[in-house]
Image (cartoon, grey):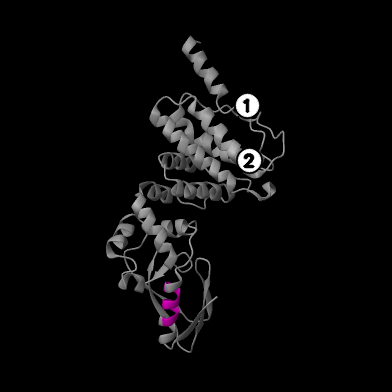
Amino acid sequence: MAIDEREEEKESKSLFTMDIKDLAGLSEPLKRVIDCLDKGISSLMHPYVFKRDERAKMVIEQERSSQNAIIAFKEAMAQDMINVARTSRDRNELHNIAEIYGGAMAEFQGIDPSKLPATLPSDEWSAHFYDCAKDCSDDEIRVIWSKILAGEIKSPGKYFKRTLTYLKQLEKHEAEWFVNLCKYTLEDAYIPYFVLQDEILPMNQYQSLVDCGFLNSSDCQVVFDKDVVLKMKGCSLNLEVGDNPYHMKVMTFTDTGMQICGLVNVETDMTFAQSLVDKINSSKLAKATLL
């Protein structure tokens, strides 16, 4: 073996042998997060690959708070990865990845490890996630990436690869438009059309979100023929239908839009909610109240 090859092997074995002692109750989720990272990182870090025997040496030695464990995980991951990064771009990418994968750990607080599925996210999905997430330096969007990773580990197959692609391509201002639009949704799936007609959602924002793959370009009618409670963000709409069905003209999210909307933490705009109630009640075909 040539000298440089021995050096590379030495570095690869040292990669990720960080001292993580504060992972109370998070050892199994940690293994799964690292497994996803292992599958995604090889293209950037080649020939610096993770060694499973080294990773297996990480054990829980002390019990402290889960929050401290997550902080330790982020810091240790970032430092060990940055040590082998070859360019400033690599270091930026690895910092982003450390924040995202470390953030995913926070989503496992209070989760019973025995409830995690036997299967893991696929190699293909994990690699695609890494490639899509590594360039994200926006703190708020990194939170969404972390939630996607944690959600996929909890339920493999939950998030489509195209969702990752669309999120990667989203500009910061478009992300802000989308988050704002989530304040006007029902069931994380559709938006009453008057949001566009009344210019609550400007036409240019609507068109951009269509182009980004988050909104469908055609409106449609949702027909309610029985009483239903519709989920909103932080409240619900109770709809009591009369003798005839109630038709609501709506804009709809794509699959990607629905998946991301479900991760966005905002509260329904109450002015909008009351306007929706008033419009429904004025139709005389249904009665609406907020819960």
Q: Is residue 106 magenta?
A: no
The magenta stretch is 272-278
Q: Is residue 254 visible?
A: no
User: Measured along the vertical axis of the image, is residue 63 above or below residue 18?
Assistant: below
Q: What separation in Å lies between label 2 and label 1 (alpha carbons)?
A: 25 Å
Horizontal placement of 118 versus 249: left or right? Answer: right
Q: Residue 217, image x and y in percent?
A: 31, 64
Of discs 2 and 1, which sits in the foreground? 2
Q: Which numbered tag is attached to residue 53?
A: 1
Q: Residue 212, image x and y in percent?
A: 33, 54
User: Measured along the vertical axis of the image, is residue 270 above or below residue 166?
Assistant: below
Where is residue 175, by image quadrant?
bottom left
Helix, strand or loop at mark 1:
helix
Q: Amino acid at mark 2?
A: Asn
- Mark 2 lies on residue: 68
Between discs 2 and 1, the one toward the N terminus: 1
Q: Residue 34, image x and y in percent?
A: 57, 37
Q: Nearer the viewer, residue 201 or 241?
A: 201
User: Measured along the vertical axis of the image, is residue 72 above or below residue 272?
Assistant: above
Q: Residue 37, image x and y in percent?
A: 52, 37
User: Measured along the vertical axis of the image, is residue 38 above or below residue 159?
Assistant: above
